[in-house]
Image (spheres, coloured by chain):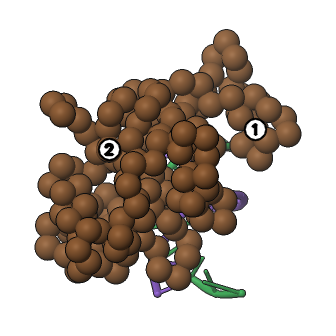
Chain colours: A brown, B purple, C green
Amino acid sequence: MAGRRYWLVKSEPSAFSWADLLKSPHRTAEWDGVRNFQARNLLKNEMKVGDGVFFYHSSIPQPAIVGTAVVVREGYPDHTAWDPKSAHYDPKSTREKPVWYMVDIRAEAELPYPVTLETIKRTPGLEEMVLLHRSRLSVQPVTEAEWNIIVALGKKGA
DNA sequence: GCCAACGTTGGC
DNA sequence: GCCAACGTTGGC
């Protein structure tokens, strides 16, 4: 697909896991709760319908990319910011002037061999991944070359 | 506008 | 559970 871009989103499986995404209606979920401006800008402006998304499990013994997803709805206001009962409530965000945005993603394929952080660190061609250098960014860009290397590893193992 | 304090993320 | 990295806040 021309102009298709690639991304990586992180989630702690205890909060929302790959299995949770698979169980969601139409295997689709709102990627809500992102409260970081750089990540927000990517969600709001850069991620387009059809873009590829790696689903990464963080804060576990073996952090890893476990599946691929696709963007099915582009940036729109994150309504959880308006809900005082939500853990992601932010009174600075209003319906008139939303601060936080999200996209919808749909699960595409599970990687038969999850690509661990450890593998990423020692795989030639992945040295420059944002994951290794700005590890705290929860939505980050992935190059096409990186995407292809990781998809291949995920199919066949390292 | 600087920068110290603070809070959160996330690997280990 | 620790702590380094780093984004955000707020006093000045």
Closer-to-camera residue (A38/A13): A13
Q: Is residue A116 left or right of residue C4?
A: left
Q: Position of residue A152 (x, y in %)?
A: 20, 65
Residue drawn at (32%, 38%) of the image: A51
- Give whichever of discs 2 and 1 has the lower sequence position: 2
Q: In which chain is the residue bearing label 1?
A: A
Which residue is the site of mark 1? Answer: A89
Please, what is the three-letter code of the amino acid marked with disc 2?
A: Gly
Which residue is the site of mark 2? Answer: A52
Residue drawn at (46%, 74%) of the image: A63
Residue A123 lies, with reference to residue A102, above or below; the image says below
Q: Position of residue A106 (x, y in %)?
A: 47, 42
Q: In which chain is the residue bearing label 2?
A: A
Say which quadrant the N terminus of chain A sits in.
top left
Dot 1 falls on a residue whose secondary structure is loop
Residue A69 lies, with reference to residue B5, above or below; the image says above
Please, what is the three-letter code of the amino acid marked with disc 1?
A: Tyr
Q: Quadrant of residue A92?
A: top right
Label 1 near label 2: C-beta < 8 Å? Answer: no
Residue B5 lies, with reference to residue A5, above or below; the image says below
Residue A12 seen in this snapshot: yes
Q: Position of residue A146 (x, y in %)?
A: 20, 58
Q: Is residue A139 left or right of residue A78?
A: left
Residue A134 seen in this snapshot: no
Q: Quadrant of residue A72?
A: top left
